[in-house]
Amino acid sequence: MATQTMGAVRLHEHGGPEVLQYDVVPIPEPGPGEVLVRVRAVGINPPDWYLRGGMTTMPGETEPTVSLPVIPGTDVSGVVEAVAADVDSLSVGDEVFGLLRFPGFRGSAYAEYVAAPAADLARKPAGIDHVHAAGAPMAGLTAWQFLIDVGHDHPSPFQEKPHRPVPLGTGTTVLVNGAAGGVGHFAVQLAKWQGARVVAVASGAHASFLRELGADRFIDYTEHRAEELVHAADLVVDTVGGAESRRFLRTLRRGGAQFPVMPGVFDEDEIAKLGVSVSSAQVRSSGAQLASLGRLLDAGTVRVQIDSTFPLADARAAHERAARGHVQGKIVLTVG
């Protein structure tokens, strides 16, 4: 019997978006604890272009986790086509979405079919389509694990202690830097869901969008520096990171916290002098947490903003769009 095949985007070498190649490969078979998903949409994320550029070892790991050729991607939404004998939580025909095998580069999501751990999947919210569902997993779970519930005791590879969210509610102020991006727009909405006052920092083009999401105050970073305008915030969620992340420490009250989603550069003496804390987490796959987020998506309490969509075979153009920056929400590949 001939092996069934599918279309998939693979990397045969590392480099720019041009190395993303559309191939015909065998359809995978689900192993123990897995289901086969017919993919309808794929969300793209920074680890996808890190892998494309040559990163094969996740932070905190000592050995490469993948070898070429490799199918990139972790975020999927689709329909269950087959179920391993030991899986009873999902059935053929279920619509599901998930963040697959993260942290790691073994998600293999840029394909028409993927063998996915059942524990990484949740049922797709009925109120949203596959494109919007595919935009939710990594970005939504990152915001959830930073702000609401970590759900595990694994410390970030960038710090020794486990991350702990801070209580949010009426009377608390959260500043979100990079608020219009994938993680940022979820952080704005989850902080508002918890009752916090939200200050959103992004470029001026995103002002009306972020106010629609519930931001109480908007700061255009091209015109103003947030640390000169905001004081006594309870929490900063910085989705940009880098050398300038430390400047947001000055927006915090004593006892406040800064959560850098991307690695930042901080001075321990400055942190101690200001009486604040800095903590990070590494997002991990969780079907259970995704189900909780899915209920908010289904109710319309949280929404997924789609920046743009591209056919799976045109993954190169999707990565080129990401490289141009100023993304509003998520970039998604469509399948079929």
Image: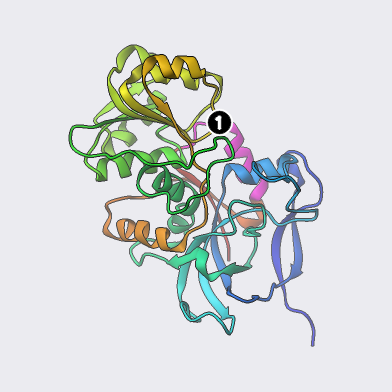
Residue 127 covered by magenta stretch: no
Residue at the far left in the pictured view: 170
Q: Residue at x 40, y 14 (%)?
A: 273
- Looking at the picture, how far across and down is residue 219, in whole percent? 34, 22
- Tell me the residue that label 1 is attached to: 263
Up-down relation of residue 283 to residue 237 (above or below): below
For the record, the magenta segment spans 315-327
Residue at the far bottom in the pictured view: 1
Residue 324 covered by magenta stretch: yes
Amino acid residing under circle 1? Pro
Q: Residue at x 26, y 41 (%)?
A: 192
- By secondary structure, the bulk of the magenta-drawn segment is best described as helix
- Looking at the picture, how far across and down is residue 28, in whole percent? 69, 72
Q: Residue at x 50, y 50 (%)?
A: 138
Up-down relation of residue 272 to residue 137 (above or below): above
User: Few, some or many C-alpha atoms within 10 Å of disc 1 (few <14, some 14-19, many ≥20)?
Assistant: some
Q: Nearer the viewer, residue 137 or 318?
A: 137
